[in-house]
């Protein structure tokens, strides 16, 4: 299980990226204006069928979009 993440407003991002995950200041400052913007999509997933069945499928739906459903057999 991953460690819990601290929630902070997007306005703090330029300041937060200047520190490592351990809280130490980075040796070289990061300029977010020079970084390529990327997009992340979060999914909500659930199991369809019996938990230990070979026919069970994991169904995932992107959060906040309502379009399309991913299915993993």
Image (cartoon, rainbow, N blue to C red):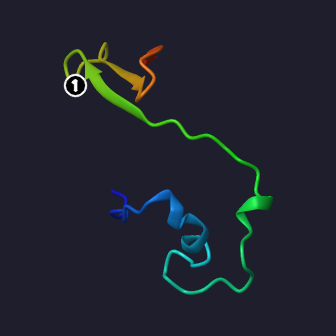
Q: Residues within 10 Å of mark 1 (few under 14, many from 20)?
A: few
Q: What residue sits right under mark 1 in the picture?
A: 52
Q: Residue at x 62, y 77 (%)?
A: 18
Percent coordinates x, y for residue 61 in the rendering: 40, 23
The quadrant of the rendering that contains the C terminus is top left
Percent coordinates x, y for residue 53 in the rendering: 24, 18
Q: Residue at x 44, y 60 (%)?
A: 9
2 or 9, nearer to the observer: 9
From the viewer's perspective, tell me whether residue 72 is left or right of residue 31: left
73 or 47, nearer to the observer: 47
Task: Find numbered disc 1 in the image and state the secondary structure of the residue it sits on.
Answer: loop
Percent coordinates x, y for residue 25 in the rendering: 60, 86
Question: In the figure, 23 relative to 67: above or below?
Answer: below
Question: In the figure, 57 relative to 38: above or below?
Answer: above
In the picture as drawn, the residue positioned furthest to the left comes out as 50
From the viewer's perspective, tell me whether residue 63 is left or right of residue 53: right
């Amino acid at each position: 299980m991953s460690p819990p993440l601290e929630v902070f407003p997007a306005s703090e991002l330029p300041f937060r990226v200047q520190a490592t995950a351990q809280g130490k200041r980075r040796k070289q400052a990061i300029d977010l204006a020079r970084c390529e913007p990327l997009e992340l999509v979060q999914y909500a997933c659930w199991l369809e069928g019996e938990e230990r069945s070979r026919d069970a499928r994991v169904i995932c739906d992107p959060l906040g979009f309502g379009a399309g459903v991913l299915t993993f057999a």
